[in-house]
Image (cartoon, rainbow, N blue to C red):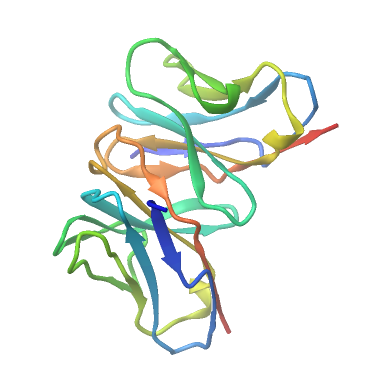
Amino acid sequence: DAGITQSPRYKITETGRQVTLMCHQTWSHSYMFWYRQDLGHGLRLIYYSAAADITDKGEVPDGYVVSRSKTENFPLTLESATRSQTSVYFCASSDEGLKSPETQYFGPGTRLLVL
Amino acid sequence: AQSVAQPEDQVNVAEGNPLTVKCTYSVSGNPYLFWYVQYPNRGLQFLLKYITGDNLVKGSYGFEAEFNKSQTSFHLKKPSALVSDSALYFCAVREVDMRFGAGTRLTVKP
């Protein structure tokens, strides 16, 4: 079934470990986004990508790294996880970028717990 | 700087009654405004958006929203609530980038 998928759906890790969250979309959308969802904050943009090999910082990029070697994949890496990165992470994609009215389509989310 | 506020953490309504979920925004130019819904353990689903034109926007599942420029509001409405409408609702504004409100949990009781 086409769409946007995330893996893993649930992850428990320890402080200081490296963690990579995967995102894959089958629509060939140019733009992809990573958000984190925390109680009281709604969703906050971590990083986004306009195309393969083009990435840019969002509102809360510290502690995260992204790459986009292929249009359909947009992995998010926590290089050294901290407890403050415990959150639910959502990947999204759209045909156009941040300044357009184009709808973003969201994946099911990854629930990350950092002990 | 752009921002969006959802003044109510929780909204409770009885099934069959009209519902309103409030949203106000702050931008320097003309905004694009969105409503998304999130069901438990699911990603956000698009409901509707305002770009330009008619201030009353109709969306999925019988929802609509009214853009009010003078009050900088974009409240989500539905004439008759269903128990299945119970979910977390997010308002979002896009000017420079996408900003989401903190969310409003809607509970519709039978």
Find residue A80 and report its image quarter.
Answer: bottom left
Look at 43% across and 12% down and name the residue there: B55
Percent position (x, y) of residue B58?
A: 49, 18
| Image quadrant occupied by the C terminus of chain B | top right
Percent position (x, y) of residue A82?
A: 47, 80
Q: Is residue A59 visible?
A: no
Q: Is residue A48 visible?
A: yes
| Image quadrant occupied by the N terminus of chain B | top left
Find residue B88 and report its image quarter.
Answer: top right
Between residues A87 and A11, which one lies in front from this camera angle?
A11
Can you say whether B76 is above or below B40 in the image?
A: above
Percent position (x, y) of residue B48?
A: 46, 28
Between residues B6 and A52, which one lies in front from this camera angle?
A52
Can you say whether A7 is above or below A37 in the image?
A: below
Look at 68% across and 34% down and name the residue there: B85
Look at 50% across and 42% down and name the residue there: B45
Look at 58% across and 43% down and name the residue there: B103
Percent position (x, y) of residue B99?
A: 40, 43
Can you say whether A64 is above or below A31 in the image?
A: below
Find residue A67 and report its image quarter.
Answer: bottom left
The residue at the far right in this view is B110
